[in-house]
Image (cartoon, rainbow, N blue to C red):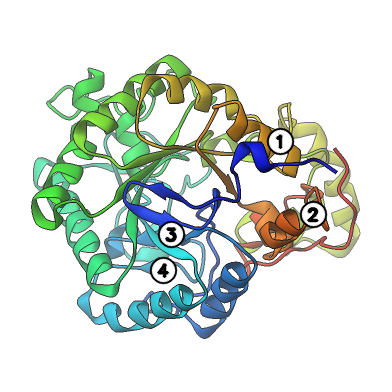
Amino acid sequence: MVMTESSGIFEPAHIGGISVRNRFIRSATHEGMADTDGAPLESLEKLYLRLAKGGAGAIVTGYAGVLPQGRSSFPGMLMMHSDALIPAYRRLVEAVHREGAALIIQLAHCGAQTRSAVTGMRTVAPSPVRDRYFSEEEPMALTEQGIRAIINAFVDAAVRAQAAGFDGVQLHLAHGYLLAQFLSGYTNRRRDSWGGSLVNRFRIVLEIIVRIRQRLGHYPVLAKMNGYDGMPGGMRPDEAVKIAMMLEASGCSAVEISSGTVSEGLAIMRGPEMPTDALLKANNFKLDALPKWLRPMIARILPLISPESPKPYHLYNLEVASAIKKAVSIPVMAVGGIHTLEDASKTIADGDADFISMSRPFINDPSIVRKFEEQSQNASRCTMCNHCAIMIEKEPLRCWNGRVPHRA
C-alpha cells in the first residue's frame, strides 16, 4: 500500500482563495440532472452530497449554460442565465457546504457544439466552421454585438453564482465549446480583433475575466483549458503554456488542464475497448432505430471505421500540466486518467500539478477519496468502458460497469 504523507495530498489547501480539505477535485461532469429551466434536481443534490460525504475536496458542477442559445443538446443541462435560478442553487450550495466540500460552478456556452433542433436557435461560432459531430448545419459567425452579448452573459452568470453562494466559477475553455473555439486556430478564422493572433483569439476570455473582476473583486475565477487537441491547426502544448500565462496575467485564479474536442469523436475517450453497446443505444447516434438483426453487424464494423483510442490511457495530460505548472504561479489542476492513489500522490509530490481532478473514478465511486485516505482502496475500479460518456446523450449520469475490477 502506497504511503502518501509526504505529498500532502490529504492536507487542507487553497485554490485561488477557496479553502479545500484536500487536493482531490471532482472535475466538471455533465450529469443530466436539471429540469427544463436548468435548475438542479433533487437527484443532483443527492449526487453532490455523496461526493461531499465521500471526501471530495471540491466539486465542479457539470457545465451550466450562460445563454439559451448555448444550451447543450444533451438533456438535463444546468443553466445560469436567469436570476430566477439563484434560490435553487443556493439550496444546493448550502447542502454541499454542510458536508465540508467546496462547490464551484462551471460556466459555458456550447457554440457550434449543440443542435438548433434543441435550442430553437441557429448555432453560432467564431467562424462558420462546420462541426464534425454536431453537423446539422454550418454555424453562424458571431457579430461584434453577438460577442458582446456573450461576454455580458458570462459576467452576469458569475454574479448569480456569487449570489447563490458558490465558492467560485470555472470558465469552460476546453473540449471544443465556444470559448475554446475562439482560442483554437482551427475554429477561429476571423480577421478582426477577435481572431488571427493568439492575443486576439484570447480577447473574449480576457474581457470576461476583467469584467468579472470589475463586478466581483477577488471572487475566484478558474478556467478549464485544453493542453492540446487533435484538430489540424488546433491547440498545441506550446500555445497552451502561453494561454495559461495570459490567464494568470488576466486575473485567473487557477487552471485545470484537459485535452481534446468533441469533434475528435471516440478518439478522445481513452479506453481499451470500443463502447459499441452504448453507441447502439444512444439516441443521437440514430443506431437504436436499426433492425435488431443488423445491429451485430454494425457492432463488428464500428471498431473498424472509428479511430482507436490513443494511448496512454493514464496520466495523458500530465506532461502538459507539468509544463504549465513551471510557467505560472497560480494553482494547476491536472485531469485525465489519474486513477490510482500512487499516481495522484506522485503527481503532487513531484510538483507536476497542485491538485488532482477526476471524473470517471467519481462516477464509478463517489466515495473514492475517503477510501484512498483510509487506504482501504488504492485504485479506481473504473474500467474506462466509456458507456457513461456515450449514454449521457440518453439519460442521466451513472456508471454502467461499476462492478468490473479495474485493469491498467
Residue that mark 1 sits on: 343
Residue at image x 80%, y 48%? 379
Q: Amino acid at mark 1?
A: Asp
Quarter holding residue 346: top right
Q: Amino acid at mark 2?
A: Gln
Residue that mark 3 sits on: 72
Q: Secondary structure at mark 4?
A: strand
Image coordinates for residue 144, horizontal then vertical, percent: 10, 41
The single residue placed furthest to the front in the displayed view is 5
How many numbered tags mark residues here? 4
Task: Report how far apart the C-alphas of labels 4 and 3 lie in the structure.
Answer: 9 Å
Dots 1 and 2: beta carbons under 8 Å? no
Residue at image x 44%, y 24%? 324
Residue that mark 4 sits on: 78
Task: Report how far apart the C-alphas of labels 1 and 2 lie in the structure.
Answer: 14 Å
Task: Report how far apart the C-alphas of labels 1 and 4 lie in the structure.
Answer: 32 Å
Q: Residues within 10 Å of mark 4 (few under 14, many from 20)?
A: many
In the image: residue 86, left or right of residue 343: left
Residue at image x 38%, y 62%? 64
Image coordinates for residue 197, horizontal then vertical, percent: 22, 17
| Mark toward the start of the polypeptide (1 vs 2) | 1
Is label 2 or label 3 in front?
Answer: 2
Q: Amino acid at mark 4?
A: Leu
Task: Report how far apart the C-alphas of labels 4 and 2 lie in the structure.
Answer: 35 Å
Q: Secondary structure at mark 3?
A: loop
In the image: residue 48, left or right of residue 120: right
Is label 1 or label 3 in front?
Answer: 1
Image coordinates for residue 11, horizontal then vertical, percent: 55, 50
Residue that mark 2 sits on: 375
